[in-house]
Image: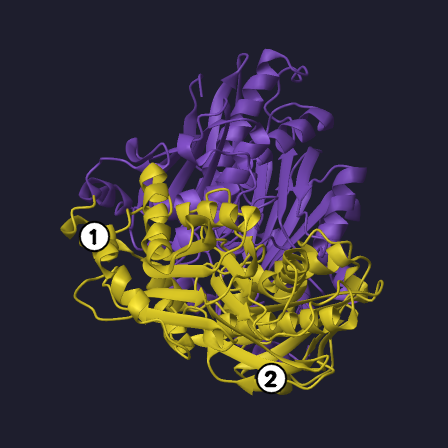
Chain colours: A yellow, B purple
Amino acid sequence: MDFPINRIKGGVGAAKGFLTSAIACGIKNPAVERLDLALIHSETPCVSAGTFTTNRVKAAPVKMTQTHVRKGNLRAIVANSGNANACTGMQGIHDARAMADGVAKPLGLKRGEVGVCSTGVIGLPMPMMRIEPHFEKLIDGLARSKGDEVARAIMTSDTRPKELAISFDLGGTRVRLGGCVKGAGMICPSMATMLCFITTDVVISKEDLQRAVLEAVEESFNRITIDGDTSTNDTVLVLANGASGGRRLRRNGPRCRQFREALKWLMLELAKAIVRDGERVTKFVHVKVRGARTYLDAKKVAEAVCKSALVKSSWNGGDPNWGRVLHAVGYSRASIREELIDILYDGTPACTGGLQATTAMEKLRDIAAKPEFEIEIRLNQGSAEYDMYSSDFSPEYIDFNRSEYAYWKQARKDGLV
Amino acid sequence: MDFPINRIKGGVGAAKGFLTSAIACGIKNPAVERLDLALIHSETPCVSAGTFTTNRVKAAPVKMTQTHVRKGNLRAIVANSGNANACTGMQGIHDARAMADGVAKPLGLKRGEVGVCSTGVIGLPMPMMRIEPHFEKLIDGLARSKGDEVARAIMTSDTRPKELAISFDLGGTRVRLGGCVKGAGMICPSMATMLCFITTDVVISKEDLQRAVLEAVEESFNRITIDGDTSTNDTVLVLANGASGGRRLRRNGPRCRQFREALKWLMLELAKAIVRDGERVTKFVHVKVRGARTYLDAKKVAEAVCKSALVKSSWNGGDPNWGRVLHAVGYSRASIREELIDILYDGTPACTGGLQATTAMEKLRDIAAKPEFEIEIRLNQGSAEYDMYSSDFSPEYIDFNRSEYAYWKQARKDGLV
């Protein structure tokens, strides 16, 4: 960014006028004490914007929250981990509404002012008997600077909480922007399978916020992939309450552009954090496509390379296998010419004009052995570019995802199936 | 099939008038004695047809053989494993030509009558010094009933040779049809990454043979997937020499339709054999999509389910995770309605109307524990159908594909890089 920012503490609770809370309900397993229900609340009215999964099978809370965001503005978000409330039919809608109502009433809000997000196993009913008795405790817990607890409560297979907050000067007014994400599995372009909550105290219109969110998501969460799957529950929600004071951002004015840049930067940092914490991930690879004929060609090439199981397996082995990269470029359906293509690892040529470069294999191997590296694919046909962030595929990923049978056993104990 | 067939011995060498040979050259590793160079030759002129990879990065032998098939008819095929001769530039073209010439001259053929196929590592030059001295031995070895040796010589990460031959009555004339395949990794629709050679002694025109091949490939090799990757070397070649005698098949006549049906059946059996022998595969899953609005919708759903890393991981664990199947249906971009969808495992409902069926989980788990089972996805919106054959993803697949560094070391020993 071309303006100074300060990293500040507090994550999604860092912006002025926002309170957060998180408690343990035992949603996934009552025997285990871990945070699994979170609440974000603005003391004053907000404008809000969001983007949602493109999967046609949408979880009940996604359907409801999407309507709330379209028709009005959220002032609170309640989120749980341990159950996605997806593929749950009318009961799911009923449960999502009950979650919204559970916090709306005591906070003096309408149902439409509450966003609900769920993440976890698909196809099992929500264990509402373990959630509903705890709304009072959740609301009683509302406080400043509990943002990190929200970040922990939405974790599923994530190994660590992922949050970030910044403050910066916006035309003489100090503003704050903070957020948290969860991700780990099922991460793919067209909305990474994840939840992202961002709050800010800037003064902005709903329309301008929605534009900024769409643009920022396109250049952050839509550019990461872990396993190529897209989930039923992906949601990005951004709340702006104007508590910083100062004049409202003027559309396309310099302050508005500056805010958009900051939002994009924050989302990209959070998106990268998701890849780095991907399920059983050992590598973080930045794939840069350069010199494509069109933007769409560049995107196709990046996506084919970042999603190839063979390419991702070779990353896991630290193998600088440019042949597999080139073969993925070949089946990407982009307009390419094999004999023009260069492939570089951290700037060192591995393939020049479609052929093996003269670089010593040991040098490339040292680069591919690092936990993070860049692969630049130069198509040398035009000037379009695309960047993506991907991870390896590890044997442990599959082992980890082989069975969710434990969920079923717990659900049966609960009398839900 | 609705007519009787006999399974016969001999694989790709079973048809009348075809001779085959296979030898060990040490292409991949001179220290290991295994068959890696094969030859198929018809004693009399043939008509021939083929389909080739849709990858824009095509191996040198693919480019050359594609031209030979377009411009004329093959009478011989020379094939090697251990090196794909892909991403090898002008040297690759030169080497592919040298392989064609190496067998054409002693057999009294033109270069254009020889098809060349290579499979193995990408990006390394062909070790021609280990191939060229052996053409004489290869040709001297030509004999009937060595088809199984051809099937073994084209194996790479395959664990077993895959071949099949049949004979049947075609309007009073006994005809034979036999073939072999290699596959294992990089298998995906739009040409599985594989080689398939089929010979037959029917009397058919080139045009009719090409039609029959295109139709059969569409319903066999284009319907399998192991890892979603498409290779640089995929090739299906079919040679028909007319040695059975009898009248030529009349286009769209009953004998022609019967031959097409037999060819399709043979290719589908060989395609299924590839999936069953996929790299570190433990499950064979037949995915049936029914009741789609359009053929394209049915295909999109089948491909999304068969390629989902999460679905394939759950198959590896024997987990009847219909939620993951449904979420893949959701992101397939097909026109679907969640609340209409039924999912059945071997005919037993797991999901009804988008919700969990009442079937006991133990029953579904017993089905998913089997090495082979069917998943039927009923979209209940129309009458279009699509079938695909897929495998699980195993931790061992990734472990197996982590590194090809050994190839590089051998190539350096050979002075090729």
Residue type indicated by callout 2: Ile
- Quadrant occupied by the C terminus of chain A: top left
Say few, some or many: other residues with alpha carbon within 10 Å of mark 1 (under 14 / 14 to 19 / 20 or more).
Answer: few
Q: Nearer the viewer, mark 1 or mark 2?
A: 1
Q: Which residue position holds label 2?
A: A367
Q: Earlier in the sequence, mark 1 or mark 2?
A: 1
Q: Is residue B29 visible?
A: no
The answer to whether the residue labelled 1 contacts the one labelled 2, judged by CB atoms less than 8 Å apart, is no
Residue A112 lies, with reference to residue A251, above or below; the image says above
Can residue A42 be seen by looking at this rendering?
A: yes
Q: Residue at x 59, y 74 (%)?
A: A266
Identify the chain of the residue marked 1, using the numbered disc in the image: A
Q: Which residue is mark 1?
A: A129
**Element under label 2?**
helix
The image position of residue A123, as x and y in percent, is 33, 46
Residue at mark 1 to residue at mark 2: CA–CA distance: 52 Å
Amino acid marked by disc 1: Met
Mark 1: secondary structure:
helix
Foreground of the two, A358 or A13: A13
Q: Residue at x 49, y 78 (%)?
A: A14
Asked whether A263 or A85 is in front, the reply is: A263
Left or right: B363 as drawn, with respect to A318: left
